[in-house]
Amino acid sequence: MFWRDREAVKLLVDGRTAYLEGAFQNAINCFTEVIVQNHDIFFEVNGRILLCKALLEAQKLELLEFELESFRNFVRRNKLIPAAKRSQHGTFAKLFKKFVLVLGHKQQKILPDLKTLQNSISSGSVHLPTEIRWLEQRVAAEISKRSMVVSKAVPNRNSAPLQTFQNC
């Protein structure tokens, strides 16, 4: 049993390293292997969360939607996870899925949806500090990016200096 835990830890570390280096496909492969080969609830939950993060970074949104739904079902049905943790992981997956669905839309009017999602995250309903901080940062970055696109698309009339012509 110990060798199995050791292998799972090695895969998680390798996947985390690949994720931090930007090699998202390698990270996805490591995290998937952790989920498939391991039967320890701790490694499986962590592997699934990290897999979702890597899928987002790799822009595999359809696969990410499927994985988030799978993660929610896994957490909801697994009785080895304490009820409080089940609720927290389920809420995190739900908020994460909302973010992915909002990202899937290419329209500019998703900015209000992103701000609503940001308020939901900030409300403190989920107590998974690392994951929530990460999700908050991703939503804030997307809001900033979308706000810049909107502000470039709609020039502000008050910001342009008035031109005066002297020798007309």
Image (tube, rainbow, N blue to C red):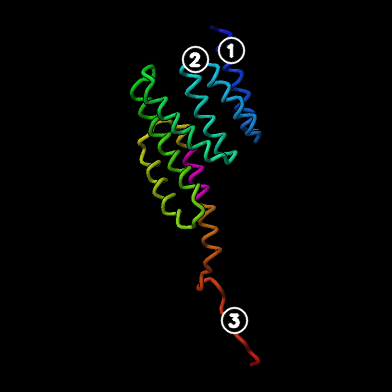
Residue at 49%, 56% in the rendered image:
107
Residue 39: image tag: 2
Viewer-nearest residue: 85 or 130: 85
Residue at 53%, 16% in the rendered image:
38
Residue 139 % position (x, y): 48, 45
Residue at 58%, 21% in the rendered image:
33
Q: How many C-alpha atoms fall within 10 Å of the one at disc 2: few (<14), some, or many (≥20)?
A: few
Residue at 45%, 54% in the rendered image:
111
Instruction: Name which residue type carries label 3.
Output: Gln
Q: Is residue 10 above or below residue 92?
A: above
Question: What secondary structure is marked by label 1?
Answer: helix
Label whose residue precedes the other's in the sequence (2 or 1): 1
Mark 3 and mark 2 in contact? Answer it, CB < 8 Å: no
Instruction: Name which residue type carries label 1.
Output: Arg
Extent of the magenta region? 134-143
In this rendering, which labeled residue sits more in front, label 2 or label 1? Answer: 2
Q: In which quadrant will I find the C terminus?
A: bottom right
Label whose residue precedes the other's in the sequence (1 or 3): 1
**Mark 1 to mark 3: distance in Å?**
70 Å
Q: How many C-alpha atoms fall within 10 Å of the one at disc 3: few (<14), some, or many (≥20)?
A: few
Question: What secondary structure is marked by label 3?
Answer: loop
Which residue carries the number 3 mark?
A: 163
**Mark 3 to mark 2: distance in Å?**
71 Å
**43 lies left or right of 78:** right
Q: Is residue 29 above or below residue 115?
A: above
Which residue carries the number 1 mark?
A: 6
Secondary structure that dominates the magenta span:
helix
